[in-house]
Image (spheres, coloured by chain):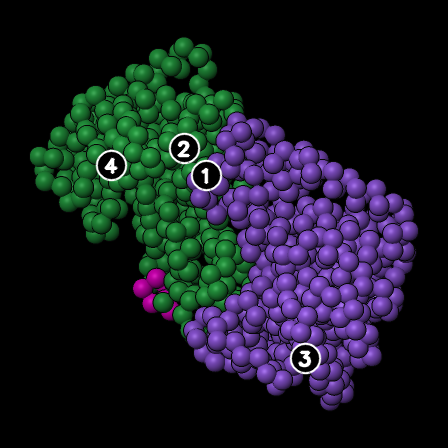
Chain colours: A green, B purple
Amino acid sequence: MSFSFEVLKTDPTGARRGRLTTPHGTVETPFFMPVGTQASVKALTQEGLEDLGAEIILANTYHLYLRPGHELVRKLGGLHQFMSWPRAILTDSGGYQVFSLSELRKMTDEGVRFRSHLDGSEHLLTPEKAVEIQLALGSDIAMVLDECIETPAPRQKAEAALKRTTDWAQRARVYFQECARRSGALSQWQFGIVQGATFADLRRESAHQLVDFDFPGYAVGGLAVGEPHEITCEMTAEATTLLPKDRLRYLMGVGRPEQIADYVALGIDMMDCVLPTRAARHACLYTSEGRVLIKNARYAQDQQPVDSRCACLVCCRYSRAYLRHLFAAGEITAAILATHHNVHFYLDIMRQIREAIEFGNLANFSSEMHARYATGPA
Amino acid sequence: MSFSFEVLKTDPTGARRGRLTTPHGTVETPFFMPVGTQASVKALTQEGLEDLGAEIILANTYHLYLRPGHELVRKLGGLHQFMSWPRAILTDSGGYQVFSLSELRKMTDEGVRFRSHLDGSEHLLTPEKAVEIQLALGSDIAMVLDECIETPAPRQKAEAALKRTTDWAQRARVYFQECARRSGALSQWQFGIVQGATFADLRRESAHQLVDFDFPGYAVGGLAVGEPHEITCEMTAEATTLLPKDRLRYLMGVGRPEQIADYVALGIDMMDCVLPTRAARHACLYTSEGRVLIKNARYAQDQQPVDSRCACLVCCRYSRAYLRHLFAAGEITAAILATHHNVHFYLDIMRQIREAIEFGNLANFSSEMHARYATGPA
């Protein structure tokens, strides 16, 4: 029952191949976390996730706090037991969801007051409360509460949000360490979140300040929210060059298949994104030759698998014609099969990336992915 | 590649234990067919169905004729290949769906003219056309086109529908046998359908007339559409006593868990029903102690499995509290897990019924089921 992280190999690009150990198993890095917002990765079962080789998933503090409630989850033995998922779980802090989903949001230095998007009830989320909720959920990695702002943001607003994010990170860190001392056992790792919008100097300032709080891992937040990919990479690089090499780096909410290797090349160890699961439910399938919009009439008689180079259960058994039919007919099984394939595709990209780092040729892999997704069939 | 049916054992109640052999595997009788209307059992994959031990499923001629179209399915190698289901398939004739779903239905001696519920296009379904469509689909068992009427029906209407059903059955039989002679191989079995509404003498008349056409199996149709269970049983008995003992008997569209053994006791070998899959999607779970309406607040902290006597994957892994949460949160995985459990429950009832027949004590099993579903928790 202990945590550790070691970097095993570094690629010429700066990419790192490592291993995270948690009380719920080891996770090979760099890794991608399928998103299980409400303690369920949409359209997959936990057996399915295990078969796909997922070693860690992400769950959402905001949603689980509101429903079924963190105290209920604690009472039922924590999130792992509640959802019967024995492998690792990361919970985000809820900051982004309060920002994007809730109503009548009011931000003060104390925390953020908001109304639930479910029933309109009023809640106050503070840095300390976000720690408490995540300790109740019992995730392996918890995120501090940060202030998310709209992008692009004026400099003044970005500065203010950065200051508050740093203050909150400190309060969260102090409170978390108190809780850990009180319980006598370290059952969770807490990560800080670098903010600073699209200002390079603010990103550096944020990283500098957070490093002082000695987190075992650091996220880069508030990116991939509409800005060009080059800016995402530039801001990520500003942060990662300042973050300690022996700590995990997590780029939140990314990314598109062809972008993932770019982030890894900047020294990112972990990512999460709703894209593979959400796109699947909208009939967009990722393949080695680019996106396949399976509802397209051209697939009506196509007896090929979704991706002839893919070894997933769906590609081994079903044709494009059948998947197209399931989507056209509005069958639930369409979402099940498409999600399985897309999550397999993402986890397989990560396997290929880890292998590429071991052989020191991540740059090649990255250009190939960009080429495929520029010239793909859809 | 051949068909056969043998009765292995008969129970004092009249229940039969047998074995159906098809080109797509053997099916132990009596059996229940999960309903895969549009070439998919809702919320299950074909791997899931195999794991559950389903030996045969039902698909819908009306739906597949309209979408994706039987000629497309034929071109892609037939329904088994199209949906990647190597085991047996029965297709109904589409008569019931034309009756219940389509618009501007016009019944003549020639056939039934209707507008598609999907796009309003006009179609003519004749007994011969229903044969053609099902040969194109390549199902193992095809049903003749019958005329379905509302229940309760006036005697005159029931008589007219019965006459037309018999005429259509004869035309379908002649046309099917011509097709079989022409192709030189018997790749499908064709079943007739006994009609006659709730009139015992009409049911007997229908059975008498159909037997002359020498079908390898006979369905009893137009029942379990609102009439009391006793009437369903009475009408079924009128038919089964007249049907040849060496042919399969299929009661269409039934039934509730506690009623299944009653039908088997009347000599029924096969059934189909949307109940387990549809109820699952509406959060109604079948258990050895009765129905569990899993959204009920009483299950919010319930760490027990859905059914502690059930050996299915869902009951082995997940709690009632988690399933309740998934339904409350509107997660697709709720439908997946609930459907898996309910289909397992139905297939398990059939396993228990087959075992009971072998031990000659089906009557006991039947009373137990009635008792459980009268006193169950929901």
Instruction: Kindly state the secondary structure of the residue where label 4 is placed.
Output: strand
* Mark 4 closeness class: few <14, some 14–19, many ≥20 residues within 10 Å: some
Residue A307 magenta-highlighted: no
Q: Which residue is drawn at 26% across and 46% down?
A: A224
Q: Which residue is drawn at 27% across and 25% down?
A: A124
> Given the image, on which type of amino acid does mark 2 rest?
Arg
The residue beneath circle 1 is: B328
C-alpha separation, residue under disc 1 versus residue under disc 4: 21 Å
2 vs 3, front mark:
3
Chain letter of mark 4 equals A
B298 sits left or right of A104 in the view: right
> Given the image, on which type of amino acid does mark 4 rest?
Glu
Which comes before the other along the chain, label 1 or label 3? Answer: 3
Q: Can residue A29 be seen in this view?
A: no
Is there a contact, CB below 8 Å, between mark 1 and mark 2?
yes
The residue beneath circle 2 is: A67
Whether labels 3 and 4 belong to a single chain: the reply is: no
